[in-house]
Image (spheres, rainbow, N blue to C red):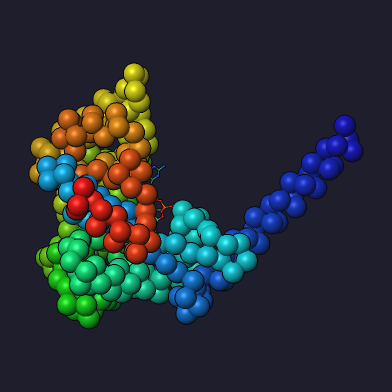
Amino acid sequence: VKENGRNNIFRYSERLEEAFSRKKVIGRQLRSAVDNGELEMHYQPILSASKLDIVKVEALLRWKSPTFGPVSPAEFIPLAEAGGSILGIGNWVLRKVCADLRSFKDQGIRLKAAVNISGLQLMQPGLPGQLSEALGDNGLTADSLELEITETMLMSDESIITSLADLRSMGFCISLDDFGTGFSSLSYLRTFPVDLIKIDRSFVAGIQPGASDDTLVRAIIELSHNLGLRVVSEGVELKEQFDLLCNLGSDELQGYFISRPLPAPSLVDFMMSYASA
Ligand code: C2E
Ligand code: CA
Ligand code: CA
Ligand code: CA
């Protein structure tokens, strides 16, 4: 038993060290990820329930680490935020997304993109300028982009509210991401300058064939509409979820049931076959 316990402790600390060095390595590699051309954008179609048409995509970052291969943004974004490299990466995302939107437009595909904005980016006074430049360089205007922010960052800083109000007056729509998972208080919805809320996929996952729990999504959609906000449902994987959310009045739907996130060329193919279907 003693021998075994020592072994376990040894293995445990070894694993701890491994995890720690993985984080360190990833944090370091992210500093040169832009320059080394390791980043890529994927785009997930978002369906408008009333138009039954794809009107928007969410831009989702992909990164291949030279040592670890593909790493999920759920893992590397927090590390990029901790190490500050999110600012350079975030600006690369804005430029890349606008360039891709321009290229879609040139191929006859009109799309808006929802871009995830980190709290650190929001607190940078340079963000409005970066947005204007990325758009302007590609002949686009603010209505081409929607800015997705998460609830957690809303609470932290008073200046965030001012930033959001400024961005809105520039013509950007603001979307509150992962609604229901953060430190949200419903009263924030009244005071924060947002246009849309995205229902987190954990609530959508509660809708299952047979045993549906739609109490929460129903309440969130109703409340949002009463406050004049549009609702996007995330993580729609099943027909049952799609049908119910449409019936409940969700304005937009996103999830594997419609499409997975796609690299730009596959998105173009998807849009072409969608239009002709
Ligand atoms: P998010 O903003 O909540 O993005 C939605 C996530 O749900 C994406 O994960 C997407 O691939 C996944 N997803 C979409 N439909 C479904 C579905 O039907 N079922 C399931 N199970 N998952 C679905 P992804 O691409 O791994 O991104 C994870 C998170 O990383 C994002 O969550 C976002 O918070 C962050 N992120 C991604 N790209 C960026 C970026 O460019 N900048 C910043 N700051 N954060 C980003
Ligand atoms: Ca998002
Ligand atoms: Ca989300
Ligand atoms: Ca998220």
Left or right for 32, reference 238: right
Where is residue 136? Give x, y as percent.
19, 79
Front-lying residue, 184 or 168: 168
| Residue 113 point in image, percent of width and height | 24, 61
The residue at the point 87 percent across, 32 percent down is: 1
Q: Residue at x 12, y 42 (%)?
A: 50
Q: Which residue lies furthest to the front in this view?
A: 276
Q: Quadrant of residue 103?
A: bottom left
Q: Looking at this view, name the residue that lies furthest to the right.
A: 3
- Give the camera-side residue of 233 and 26: 233
115 shown above or below 225: below
- Counting labels gives 0
* Rendering coords of residue 204 (x, y %): 32, 34
Relative to 17, 54 lies left or right:
left
Does residue 37 appear in this view? yes
Residue 167 visible (yes or no): no
Q: Give the residue drawn at x 33%, y 40%.
A: 257
Q: Which residue lies furthest to the top in this view?
A: 210
Residue 243's place in the image compared with 56, above or below, is above
Q: Is residue 16 or residue 116 the one in the foreground? A: 116
Please tell me which residue is depicted at 66% across the width and 62% down the height of the picture: 21
